[in-house]
Image (spheres, helix red, strand yellow):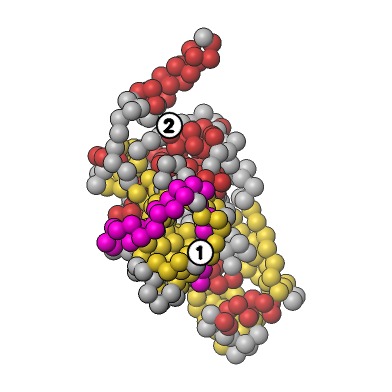
Amino acid sequence: MRTRLSFLMICAAISVVITPICPCAQDPAAPREPILVRVAVAKGADSVKIFIAGNFKIIDYLSKSVILEEKYLSETDLTATETGFKLDGKELNASAISVEPVGGSRVYINGRIFRGEIRVFKDGNKLTVVNAVDIEEYLYGVMRNEVSTWWPMESLKAQAIAARTYALNQINESKAKDYDVTADVGSQVYGGIFSEKWRTNRAVDETRDKVLTYDGAVFPAFFHATCGGSTFDAAYLWNIDLPPLKGVKCRWCRKSPHFNWEKWLSVTETEEKLAAAGYSVGDIIGFETTKRDPFSARILELKIKGDKGESVILAKDFRRIIGADIVRSTNFKVTLVGEYVAFEGLGWGHGVGMCQWGAYYMSRAGKNASEILEFYYPGSKITDYKDAR
Ligand SMILES: [Zn+2]
C-alpha cells in the first residue's frame, strides 16, 4: 500500500507539470500508428554478419513478395552480388530486401540485436543496413549512450523529449533518403537492445509521444555534453536561425567533469593534420583569433601563422580537423609551448541547445523536465507529437 500511495503521489506531482506526461494520466492501451525511425546501422559495408534466432522472412523491398522463409539462420555473411544479395549460399534476386522477424524472433546484425525490421540496400557491391524501428523503441536504444542511467529522472525525461524531438525532425527532413539517422555520433549513438537500461526506458515511457515545438513545429533540438558557461547560436554552425537555439547563459554546468579541459598535441602532428586538410603554412609559428562570438566567447574564426604563410580557418573546421575529442569545444585558447600545441578550453561539444550536465545539475536542484527544457530552448513548448507540424 505504501509503495502504491507514493507512486500515485509522484504521478500526481508530475502530471501537474506536464499533463499528460504520466502513464497513469493517459490510456496506456491507446494505440497509435508506428512512427518509424530509419537508422543506418551499417553504411558502405562489403558484408555484414547476420544471425536470426527464430522464424523469419526475407521480402523483396520493392515488390513486397516473399523470397525466402526459414526457421533459423546461423551466423553468416550477407553480401551484395551483381543481381542482388548472397545469404548462406543462396542468391536473393532483389535490389533491396527487408528482413522480417516472425513471432518475436530476434535479428542480430554484426553482433547487435535490433527491434523492428531490417532493410538492406545496395550501392554497387556495398551494403547499407537500415533498422526501421518505432521512435519510442529507437529512444530506448539511444538514451543510455547520451546520459548516465543514475541521473535524476527529470533530467532523463528532459533528454528523452529532446532526443525524440531531434529524431522526429530528422524524419521530416530525410523523406527522400533511404534512412533518417545514422547509429553513430553523426546523429545520436544507437546501440539497439544491448544499450537499453531500465531507468532510461522508463524516462522514454513517461514522456511517450511528447516533443518540443516552436511556433507549432518540431525543430532540431540539439544537445551536447557541457556548454562551459553559455550555449551557442545554431546560426553560426548550421545556418539555423531559431529563437529556441540562439543560446543562453548557463550557470548550471560549472561542476561538470567536462567544464574545463586541457589537451596537448605535438606541433608536427598539428601541422600534418592541417596540411592534410589543405591548410599548409610550413612550420607553425603561432595562432591568432580573428573572430569570436561575443555572447558565448566561442571562437568563430582563427588564423594559423606559419613560416611559409598564413591561413584563416573556421573554428568549427579547425575542431573537426584536429579532432573533436582534442579540441573539445570552440571556446578555447591555443598556444605554442616548445614542441607542443596546448589547447585549453571550456565545455564539451558543439554547444547548441540543451547542456546535458547543466540539465543534470538543474534536476539535482529540484527543477523538473519542463523547466529544464524551457530554460535551454526558450520559447519552445512541450506538445504531443500529433499536434505538432
Ligand atoms: Zn552549461
Dominant secondary structure, magenta:
strand
Q: Which amino acid type corresponds to the residue marked 1 in the rendered image?
A: Asp
Which residue does the numbered mark 1 point to in the structure image?
Answer: 88
Q: Which amino acid type corresponds to the residue marked 2 in the rendered image?
A: Glu
Magenta span includes 253: no
Indicate which disc residue 340 carries: none
| Residue 279, placed above or below residue 52 | below
Q: Quick check: is the Cβ at mark 1 less than 8 Å away from ligand 1?
A: no
Q: Which of the 4 image quarters holds residue 120? A: bottom left
Which residue does the numbered mark 2 point to in the structure image?
Answer: 206
Binning the other alpha carbons within 10 Å of mark 2 as few (below 14), some (14 to 19) or many (20 upward) gives many
Q: Residue at x 30, y 30 (%)?
A: 30
Q: Is residue 339 left or right of residue 354?
A: right
Q: Residue at x 48, y 33 (%)?
A: 202
Residue 345 x %, y %:
61, 59
| Residue 379, placed above or below residue 327 | above
Q: What is the magenta range?
A: 45-71
| Residue 154, placed above or below residue 315 | above
